[in-house]
Image: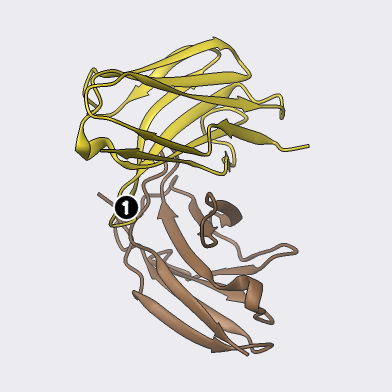
Chain colours: A brown, B yellow
Amino acid sequence: DAKTTQPNSMESNEEEPVHLPCNHSTISGTDYIHWYRQLPSQGPEYVIHGLTSNVNNRMASLAIAEDRKSSTLILHRATLRDAAVYYCIQGNTPLVFGKGTRLSVIA
Amino acid sequence: DTAVSQTPKYLVTQMGNDKSIKCEQNLGHDTMYWYKQDSKKFLKIMFSYNNKELIINETVPNRFSPKSPDKAHLNLHINSLELGDSAVYFCASSHGNRGTQYFGPGTRLTVL
């Protein structure tokens, strides 16, 4: 079973920043936090991952709480193409997907 | 150019038949996976192979048999198909079993 909890759904306006929260209160010291997303009718796609420090890449930023029990995926400017289910995954292998957060982007 | 490809994209078949889904990756990865996504959209790992050897085998009926002829391919053969096998099956690959996973486009299997 997935060890993370995420809101079922969130909504954002286009070109606004989006903060997707995730709780992973049972995380251990060696567990990475991974984010994947699944666009409609496609396979999951890697977004970002981190261990302790905040991480940035061309797609998003990952802010990890100091106690590592929660994290936030930040999309700096949501576009319509960012509408997807976003999965926060705790651990290393295998990846255990939960229900994710369905992000809707409104034009 | 497709990194992880699967064939066929759609598969409709009768109960009791045997079918195969093929997966190929051109990323040079050594680890490949099969996932099942059911009608409720839960995505669960089924198998993982590293260098053609099975390393993860979740609780999957033995009607499902993965076969890895080489590191670039991991095919899924399903015997005696049942209604409950209807789902979307995703193949993925990674460099090592902790690397970022790259997923294929999925195969939608419908068992009638």
Point 72% across, 62% down: residue: A57
- Residue A80 position (above or below residue A44): below
Name the residue rendered at 39%, 78% in the picture. A9
Decide which of A74, B61 is in the foreground and name it.
B61
Q: Chain of mark 1?
A: B
Quarter of the picture holding the N terminus of chain B? top right
Q: State the residue lying farthest toward the right.
A: B1
Residue A58 placement: quadrant: bottom right
Q: Quadrant of the C terminus of chain B?
A: top left
Q: Camera-side residue: A94 or B34?
A: B34
> In the rendered image, which quarter is residue B87 located in?
top left
Q: Position of residue B42 (x, y in %)?
A: 32, 52
Considering depth in this image, is A60 or A67 the residue closer to the camera? A60
Count neighbours of disc 1 (C-alpha within 10 A) and say few if under 14, some if 14 to 19, many if 20 or more.
Answer: some
User: How far across and down, in percent of the image, does residue A62 sit?
Assistant: 59, 67
Splitting the image into 4 quarters, where does residue B18 fall?
top left
How many numbered dots are placed on residues in this image? 1
Is residue B39 rendered to the left or right of residue A100? left
* Residue situated in front as seen by the camera: A6 or B12: B12
SS under mark 1: loop
Residue B84 at x, y = what percent?
Answer: 21, 39
Q: Position of residue A19 (x, y in %)?
A: 53, 80
Q: From the viewer's perspective, is A85 left or right of B6? A: left
Q: Which residue is mark 1?
A: B42
The type of residue carrying mark 1 is: Phe
Q: In the image, is residue B10 above or below residue B49?
A: below
